[in-house]
Image (spheres, helix red, strand yellow):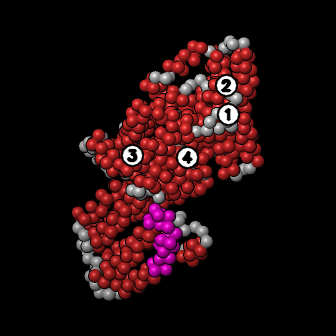
Amino acid sequence: MKRISSHPRFELRLLGVCMFLLLSPISAHAKTDASEHEISWFFLAIGLLGGLSLFLYGMERMSDALKTVAGEKMRDILGMLSNNRIMGLITGAIVTAVIQSSSVTTVMLVGFVTANLMSLSQTIGVILGADIGTTITAQIVAFKVTKYALLLMAIGFGMLFSSKKEKIQQYGYMTMGLGMIFFGMGVMNDAMQPLRTFQPFIDVMASMANPILAIVVAAIFTALIQSSSATMGVLIVLAMQGLITLEAGIALALGANIGTCVTAGLASLGKPREAVRVAVSHVLFKIIGVLVLLPFIGPFAKFIVYISPSPSEGLTSLEAAASVLPRQVANAHTLFNVAIAVLFLPLVAQFARFVFWLVPDKPLPEVEEIQPKYLSEMLFQTPSLALDAARHEIKLMGKRVDLMNTAMLPAVLTGNKEALQAVREMDEEVDVLYKHIVNYLAEVSKLQLNEYQTQKMVKLMGAVNDLEHIGDVIEVNLVDLGEKRLKKGFKISEATQKVINTVHVVVSDALKAAVRALVEEDKDFAVRAISMSEDMDRLVEQADLHQAKRLVSEDSGKFEAYSVEVEIIEKLKRIYYHAKRIAMTVAESGEEKTVISEAA
């Protein structure tokens, strides 16, 4: 498996070189040029781009580590989702606060809807919460914590090299990522210091007083870098230098909120209409919110000043603005998204109907074969959720195998050619789903999986193989036995049918219990399927005794019937064997091991 921790030394050496280059010449040139009122544009550009690169890389590294550490918890949180809009709001805020990206959360939602794991009404509340959760980044960076950046990176470095445990290493990457965010902020802050006295730049920033221009500029910038958190980081750096007014900062923040929708919009391209509706909902929330606030930016700025800390006494106007503007911009960003949630949350149902009207269903192209319902590449960003999607798809495959198993016995014992052919055709859908699930799990195996996820992926792969084998036993072996019965022209006696049906009932119950155990991760159902082994042994022994009595009877055609009847029972035993294997992948700890060893 490809893991983050497989190449830490190379990355850390690269980062060390970057830090050395950024720390020494850029800061020195920035300060020298500031003192001489001259600007070295080359070093200023390197400082801005290098600092932004570190910021974005730190965000990505921290987000990846958080998703790896909290992936299973995120899956459980998302599993709690219902039509309760408040719960959806809280869930969206929590998940986004964990992964630190509303764009990633929204892309995940597009994947969920594409995979039929969520409805549009459910996603609306989550999107509103996600927009609140992503403001945490701005709130954190608004604190003047850049001086602790190298300490955090040193702590993260120590965690990486002091422990071989993957979880500790992920926490190390998370800490280093946070340090890199702060460090990138510091580099950008130092690089921008000469601009405080550069009149052309001051004039450009003054033009941001035009809110429409500021919104467009910030939206384009955010769309290009696909991170509203990075845009807010740059805004806060500008605020730390006193280079923007609060009104301009609010307008730029509004543009960042619109620009962040581009990622979800791109993710929905080529996806089903349900996924497009998620992206459209996100865009509409932001645009409507911006249009509502746009005429009231002035009063809104005054309210933000009122609720934010005041500057210390004895500072110049520029120093006073630089001391409070970062917090004011962050508060405006948070309050805007909270206001959107308050505005739209009571109208979730009505808004969903409006989006359905705006993006109506269109006739789907006819396909010759069944298509998977839950498998979506959009879920690859969160492996635990991709594995859950595979598990849901296996449930559908299991239902088809169960229907095939139910229709099989009447067709084999008493059915005609048409009935047998119908059973054989049912296996075609099983084969198609098998192909899709195996290919999907193969792609999942290439992701950054932790040990638990790797084990889960292997179990799912084994289970889907067992279901495929059951389908093949029915389609190849048992249907062939039914055709042999028709060709030889004999009938299976009612007494023998009763014996075979009794065995089949246990096999069917075991198959249902095994699939349910796998899909619901329920060890009780797994134990139930495994414990049926004793019943199977007893019933097969009774069936063998019955067949022995049949041989000594004077029934016509008994020898032809005997071989078919014995083979039917043998294939039913084979189906139970595969069902038991599926159950054993779930029941693997504690008392269940005892049951397995006793039943094996």
Which amino acid, mark 4? Ala
Left or right of 5 on screen, residue 125: left
Residue 339 image position (x, y, % from top left): 45, 43
Q: Residue at x 56, y 25 (%)?
A: 244
Name the element at disc 4: helix
Name the element at disc 1: loop
From the image, tell me which residue sits under label 3: 344
Q: For marks 4 and 1, give the CA distance.
A: 31 Å
Residue 199 image position (x, y, % from top left): 59, 14
The residues colored magenta run 515-536
Which amino acid, mark 1? Ser
Residue 281 appears in the rendering: yes
Residue 500 appears in the rendering: no
Q: For marks 2 and 3, give the CA distance.
A: 42 Å
- Considering only vertical position in the picture, is 570 above or below 356? below
Q: Earlier in the sequence, mark 4 or mark 1?
A: 4
Q: For marks 4 and 3, give the CA distance.
A: 21 Å
Q: Which mark is residue 312?
A: 1
From the image, tell me which residue sits under label 4: 97
Q: Residue at x 39, y 35 (%)?
A: 292
Left or right of 87 on screen, residue 150: right
Q: Residue at x 35, y 42 (%)?
A: 277
Which amino acid, mark 2? Thr
Q: Nearer the viewer, mark 3 or mark 1?
A: 1
Q: Earlier in the sequence, mark 2 or mark 4?
A: 4
Magenta run includes residue 370: no
Please state which of residues 249 and 110 is positioned toward the viewer in this rendering. Answer: 249
- Considering only vertical position in the picture, is 319 above or below 61? above
Q: For marks 3 and 1, give the CA distance.
A: 38 Å
- Judge the density around disc 2: few (<14), some (14-19), many (≥20) Cα neighbours within 10 Å: few
